[in-house]
Image: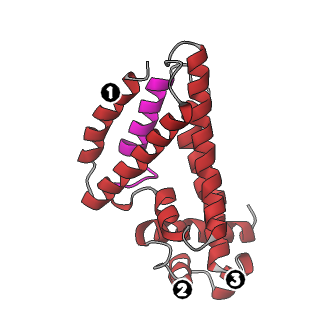
Amino acid sequence: MSKAANTRFTILNKAFELIYSKGYQTTSIDDIIATTQVTKGAFYYHFKTKDEMGIAIIEEILKPVMMKSFILPIENSIDPLDDFYNMISYLLLEDPFLQVKYGCPVGNLTQEMTPWNTQFSKALSELIEQWKNTIVKVISNAQKNNLIRKEVNGEQVAFFIMSGYWGIRNFGKLQDNNSCYRVYLKEFRNYLNSLK
């Protein structure tokens, strides 16, 4: 990796850490510069604006993480009900990237930025749409294999899984405690079993 690419990578990673813990709007470019120890000139060499850097965080940090943790674990599922449960359980209880006290970074940015920034809305929407479409496809395949009832609506299930995940993440963030995750997972298992 070239020195310039390494500097850009450092800026994005340190900025993500600050934004994840403090929020996008309360994280200033000066905060990012102080944390990365790059010059203001170096920051502006890589990003014209803070928002340009924010979009880069979505595309270059959050998108690969979502692909690895939200899409790949279920994409070619043979046993989707177990795989949905295992994916959400891992995300809530084991994933080292996600911290209880800070919630879900995609959910946080969605709540904080989409009301007034169309670029953020578009980038975040693409991530969420990919997750939703993957769940719908997996359900459809499972229905063909008689693993999920034919009358189950895949899009409804996808929205239920996604909104449940985001919702319980917010409860965990509010309480700074993962005990609510364990309660949620018990009921999530019951819900999944009802789809058979």
In this rendered view, identify the residue nearer to me: 51 or 153. Answer: 153
Q: Residues within 10 Å of mark 3 (few under 14, many from 20)?
A: few
Q: Which of label 1 and label 2 is nearer to you?
A: 1
Q: What's the mark number on residue 44?
A: 3
As measured in the structure, the alpha-carbon distance from the residue carrying label 1 to the one carrying label 2 is 48 Å
Residue 53, horizontal then vertical, whole percent:
64, 72
**Quarter of image, res 78:** top right
Residue 72 in view: no
- Please give the residue where the numbered disc 1 appears in the rendered image: 190
Q: Quadrant of the N terminus?
A: bottom right
Image location of residue 81, percent across then percent down:
46, 25
Residue 142 sits above or below residue 166 on the image? above
- Residue depicted at 70% across the width and 77% down the height: 47
Q: Main secondary structure of the magenta part?
A: helix
Instruction: Name the residue rendered at 51%, 57% in the picture.
Output: 106
Would you call the spot at circle 1 few (<14 residues within 10 Å), some (14-19), or many (20 or more)?
A: few
Badge 3 vs badge 2, beta-carbon distance below 8 Å: no
Asked if the residues shown at circle 1 and circle 2 are in contact, with their CB atoms under 8 angstroms apart, the answer is: no
Q: CA distance from mark 3 to mark 2?
A: 12 Å
Q: Which residues are magenta?
A: 80-100
Q: Nearer the viewer, residue 104 or 16?
A: 104
Residue drawn at (46%, 35%) of the image? 87
First of labels 1, 2 by sequence position: 2
Label 2 crowd (10 A; few <14 / some 14-19 / many >=20): few
Q: Does the stretch in magenta take in 19?
A: no
Residue of label 2: 30
Q: Position of residue 125 (x, y in %)?
A: 61, 55
On residue 48, which mark appears? none
1 and 3 marks in contact (CB < 8 Å):
no
Please tell me whether residue 49 is drawn above or below residue 137 in the rendered image.
Answer: below
